[in-house]
Image: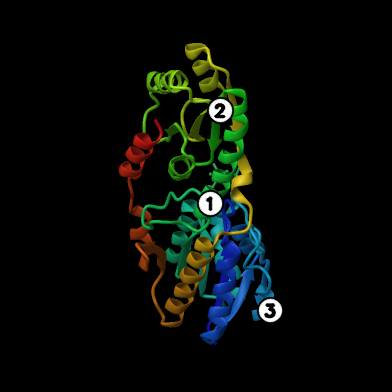
């Protein structure tokens, strides 16, 4: 019987549990044996590998985080660490893995692929920064979390006639800021892909106030090369308007996954085990439109996607 392993790696994201559930139940349905690997590549190196059954994944669909836990593994970056990981897989007669994680985690999967392991990579990260897929697992939930924060912050910003700069996650990719900014009606959206125009922000703040606007919400992705406090200080100095900051931080990584993320995770993970059952080569699974797609792992990791300029333009038009 074919034996496969499942692991989650890197920063967690809502929907990882839905992916684990679908991989485990899907694989068993397709006649495979499944092993859960704890704490990503760290647990793989240490042999933290346990068999999973259909009941191991009961009651997890609605939970954020990952029951397999996760880690960013320094040891796996070394040849020694990878050698150990491969021998652990050999010890358990596992030759295929389903890996749920971001860019770094899937690159780790590519290293294993080069050493003979079949790897199915699923994009699990709130950042939406994998170029080969329209959406990553956890992004939609994170955007909704930010959205609800914007609504609360807007209430109090209006009462006090303040500007609030809200910092959201996204080191290289500003999609969380962009999507939450448009849907939350932020006056300004700052993403790492676009240089910051201080004059334009100040102009919008002053024009808004002159038209009787009570609040001003600025969404800023963390990857911007200007700290959130520095930005707030500059805006206050240049407009004379009270400016506060809110850093949302890890609140964005937790919480029950949205229907969209559960759907994405379930469909992608089932596709992964289906491909393994068919004897496929290593693949990265993604979504294009509403279609689940798969690419050779190495090709997928080279693919890039630009931020959505139309969404940015629309946000700008609508948020005067
Ligand atoms: O990649 C996901 C992410 O949440 C980023 O948005 C953020 O910059 C980073 O992880 C934080 O990582 P850590 O959990 O290691 O602090």
Quadrant of the image occupied by residue 199: top left
Does 229 sit above or below residue 108?
above
Q: Secondary structure at mark 3?
A: helix
In the displayed structure, does residue 144 sit left or right of residue 181?
right
Task: Return the mark for residue 164.
Answer: 2
Query: Going 59% across and 78% down the picture, which residue do you hit?
Result: 34
Q: Which residue is mark 3?
A: 55
Q: Nearer the viewer, residue 196 or 315?
A: 315
Q: Disc 3 vs disc 1: which is toward the camera?
A: 3
- Residue 68 on image: x %, y %: 65, 64
Query: Going 67% across and 62% down the picture, which residue do you hit?
Result: 46
Compute the Cα span from label 2 to label 1.
Answer: 40 Å
Answer with mark 2 or mark 3, whichever residue precedes in sequence. Answer: 3
- Residue 210 on image: x %, y %: 44, 18
Q: Secondary structure at mark 2?
A: strand
Quadrant of the image occupied by residue 278: bottom left
Quarter of the figure that contains the C terminus: top left
Residue farthest to the front, as pictured: 212
Q: Disc 2 vs disc 1: which is toward the camera?
A: 2
Task: Return the mark for residue 2.
Answer: none
């Amino acid at each position: 019987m074919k034996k496969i392993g499942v692991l989650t790696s890197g920063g967690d994201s809502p929907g990882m549990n839905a992916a684990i559930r679908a991989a485990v139940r899907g694989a068993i349905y397709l006649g495979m044996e499944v092993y859960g690997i704890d704490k990503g590549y760290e647990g793989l190196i240490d042999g933290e590998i346990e068999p999973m059954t259909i009941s191991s994944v009961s009651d997890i669909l609605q939970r954020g985080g990952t029951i397999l836990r996760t880690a960013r593994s320094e040891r796996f970056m070394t040849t020694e660490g990878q050698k150990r990981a491969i021998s652990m897989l050999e010890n358990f007669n596992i030759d295929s893995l389903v890996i749920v994680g971001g860019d770094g985690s899937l690159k780790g999967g590519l290293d294993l692929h080069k050493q003979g392991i079949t790897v199915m990579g699923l994009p699990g990260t709130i950042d939406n920064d994998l170029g080969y897929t329209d959406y990553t697992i956890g992004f939609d939930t994170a955007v909704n979390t930010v959205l609800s924060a914007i609504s609360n912050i807007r209430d109090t910003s209006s009462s006090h006639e303040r500007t609030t700069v809200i910092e959201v996650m996204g080191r290289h990719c500003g999609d969380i800021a962009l999507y939450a900014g448009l849907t939350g009606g932020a006056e300004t959206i700052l993403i790492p892909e676009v240089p910051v125009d201080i004059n334009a922000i100040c102009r919008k703040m002053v024009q808004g106030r002159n038209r009787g606007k009570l609040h001003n919400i600025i969404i800023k992705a963390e990857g911007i090369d200007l700290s959130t406090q520095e930005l707030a200080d500059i805006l206050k100095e240049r407009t004379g308007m009270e400016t506060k900051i809110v850093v949302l931080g890890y609140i964005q990584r937790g919480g029950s996954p949205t229907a969209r993320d559960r759907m994405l995770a379930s469909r992608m993970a089932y596709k992964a085990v289906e491909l393994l059952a068919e004897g496929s080569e290593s693949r990265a699974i993604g979504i294009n439109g509403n279609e689940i797609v798969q690419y050779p792992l190495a090709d997928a990791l080279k693919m890039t996607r630009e931020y959505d300029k139309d969404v940015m333009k629309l946000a700008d038009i609508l948020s005067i």
